């Protein structure tokens, strides 16, 4: 059975997993999760991921896997011949895992205070404090990553990896939060613009926007959450 990726809109970090699947080129399907709908957790997706986040993956065996790093490492373990991921125990794997961990724990989480302000109401003084704190965290994460990237073409060096796919799904969040100008971080800006020209990235944008999308990988089409549930292995 082909894997099924549940991706969240609008602007879920699951975007990176769509790009990764395109790069890897193996057959897969996508299931759209409208995160802004108040009742999205009352249906089948609660069974897939009780915490209500995307991405989630139904693997080829019918097991359910959540969390971006776990999904990317699962996909990468089956595709080490692509150069996008590496065998566990190698120095290259450690570098990839380190970068994925940084992107998840520092880059991703830096936006958390800003997303709270964006999605919730509340006291104006409290929101102002969260915006100030979030802005500091986002600027620091960008500065740290800009230094780590340096003059390398990709996050790990002269070849792209699954870390670059995950990066882009998060980096675009600055479009929602006016706390950082990406141009102030020239290495990040260069990588971001380079990725935006990638066919897999353009495909992922089209999928999110529900526009005609031409897959260069193994996309077999969309599937509803309810239909995807029928493929879950019992007790997976």
Image (spheres, rainbow, N blue to C red):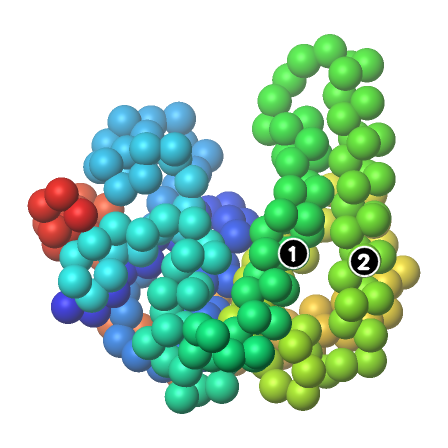
Which residue reaches farthest front? 89
For the N terminus, which image quadrant? bottom left
Numbered mark located on residue 102 in the image: 1
Which residue reaches farthest top? 123
Q: Position of residue 132 (x, y in %)?
A: 84, 31
58 left or right, relative to 162: left
Q: Mark 2 packing: few (<14 Cα in 10 Å), some, or many (20+)?
A: some
Residue at x 68% of width, y 41% of height: 111
Which residue reaches farthest right? 184
Tell which circle, 1 or 2, labels the residue nearer the N-terminal end: 1
Residue at x 77% of width, y 51% of height: 141
Circles 1 and 2, Cβ within 8 Å, touching? The answer is: yes
Q: Mark 1 packing: few (<14 Cα in 10 Å), some, or many (20+)?
A: some
Q: Position of residue 230 (x, y in %)?
A: 11, 49
Q: Position of residue 89 (x, y in %)?
A: 47, 74
Q: Nearer the viewer, residue 164 or 106?
A: 106
Q: Which residue is mark 2?
A: 144
Mark 1 to mark 2 CA distance (whole Å)? 10 Å
Q: Position of residue 120 (x, y in %)?
A: 61, 22
């Amino acid at each position: 059975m082909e894997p099924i990726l549940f991706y969240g809109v609008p602007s879920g970090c699951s975007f990176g997993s769509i790009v990764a699947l395109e790069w890897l080129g193996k057959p897969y399907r996508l299931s759209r999760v409208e995160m802004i709908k108040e009742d999205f957790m009352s249906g089948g997706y609660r069974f897939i991921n009780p915490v209500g986040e995307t991405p989630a993956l139904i693997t080829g065996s019918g097991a359910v896997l959540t969390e971006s790093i776990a999904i990317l490492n699962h996909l990468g373990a089956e595709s080490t011949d692509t150069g996008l991921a590496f065998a566990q125990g190698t120095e290259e794997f450690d570098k990839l895992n380190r970068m994925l961990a940084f992107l998840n724990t520092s880059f991703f989480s830096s936006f958390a205070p800003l997303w709270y302000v964006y999605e919730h109401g509340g006291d104006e003084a409290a929101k102002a404090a969260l915006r100030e704190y979030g802005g500091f965290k986002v600027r620091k994460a960008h500065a740290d990553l800009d230094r780590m990237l340096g003059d390398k073409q990709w996050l790990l060096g002269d070849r792209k990896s699954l870390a670059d796919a995950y990066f882009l799904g998060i980096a675009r969040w600055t479009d929602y939060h006016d706390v950082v100008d990406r141009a102030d971080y020239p290495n990040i800006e260069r990588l971001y613009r380079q990725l935006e020209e990638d066919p897999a990235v353009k495909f992922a944008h089209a999928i999110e926007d529900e526009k005609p999308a031409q897959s260069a990988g193994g996309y077999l089409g969309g599937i509803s959450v309810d239909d995807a549930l029928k493929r879950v292995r019992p007790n997976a």
